[in-house]
Amino acid sequence: QNVLSGDIDKLVSNVGKMLAQEIDAGEILNTGMLSAMEIIGERFKDGSVFIPEVLLSARALNEALKVLEPHLAGKKTGKSAKILVGTVLGNLHDIGKNMVLTMLKGVGYDTVDLGVNVKVESFVQRVLEHKPQVLGLSALLTTTMPQMKLVIEALAEAGLRNQLKVIVGGAPVTQAFSDEIGADAYAPDAASAVDVARELVA
Ligand code: B1M
């Protein structure tokens, strides 16, 4: 209910109370918060809510995610690596990207949040600057998926493609699309992004 009404204070306070009752952080996120986001998505689609309401819910969820972050840590990873994650140009949705970063950070990777709406040239620039082992690209709009291919091509043009692995994800992204654009891996959700990163880094 707090996600649906976009009530940051109540949501953060209730998440704190649930953690104090030792309710699993993953369950709070998946069963409570993300299922509410699904409802918001349906309401947006049928026209019963508009962008401001969706934005309020998303903001509340992002704030609560910060509270959950230390509790979502998984099994620490053996091998350390630097991983950059950003959403591609045209895509402002950041909850999924933030979850992926939270999980990667939780298992001990050195993560850098590149933010949202990142231009192809900026991805290349940040890769040059940070020299990561893995770059994660997130896209939530079908119209922004082609940007992922452009990023991969630009990395190749800059002579950087062989120096890092590229993981792609986001609701409309599929394994077939990942193969088609020459990404190294596709992850359907934040937990799989950790598994995939582990495999690639190993
Ligand atoms: Co937007 N939106 N939105 N929206 N929005 C969707 C995505 C949409 C499906 C809604 C709908 O029509 N039912 C639709 C896209 C349709 C399409 O392209 N096929 C849509 C639209 C159309 C739009 C606008 C164009 C609306 C408009 O202006 N008319 C506009 C575009 C903005 C832009 O990006 N340029 C827009 C705007 C917004 C808000 C700003 C209001 C807000 C975003 C706020 C924010 O993120 N800070 C918003 C929201 C919240 C949604 C919905 C409701 C929820 C998205 C979300 O956060 N899901 C969404 C409908 C829905 O999904 N039910 C919708 C929860 C999140 C945890 O899931 O991001 O999929 P997700 O992440 C998952 C996996 O995909 C994966 O892991 C995550 C966790 O397991 N994953 C990765 C994600 N990235 C990964 C990267 C990886 C690996 C895995 O490796 C690197």
Image: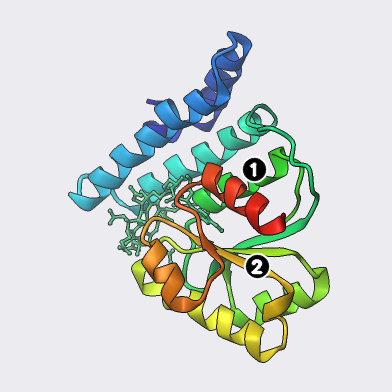
Where does the N terminus fall, quadrant-wise?
top left
Residue annotated with mark 2? 165
Local secondary structure at mark 1: helix
Q: Is residue 149 above or below residue 111?
A: below
- Residue located farthest toward the left when viewing the structure as drawn: 46
Question: Label 1 crowding class (10 Å Cα cut-off): few <14, some 14-19, many 20+?
Answer: many
Name the residue nearer the viewer: 95 or 130.
130
Marking on residue 102? 1
Give, as a three-letter code, the residue at label 1. Thr
State the image coordinates of residue 41 (x, y, percent, origin top left).
Answer: 30, 46
Name the residue nearer the viewer: 43 or 119.
119
Please tell me in which quadrant of the rendered image residue 16 appears. top right
Q: At 41% across and 36% down in the image, what residue appears?
A: 34
Name the residue nearer the viewer: 148 or 202.
202
Horizontal side, residue 170 vs residue 124: left or right = left
Q: At 70% across and 30% down in the image, what residue appears?
A: 70
- Residue located farthest toward the bottom when viewing the structure as drawn: 157
Instruction: Check if mark 2's residue and mark 1's residue have beta carbons within 8 Å.
Output: no
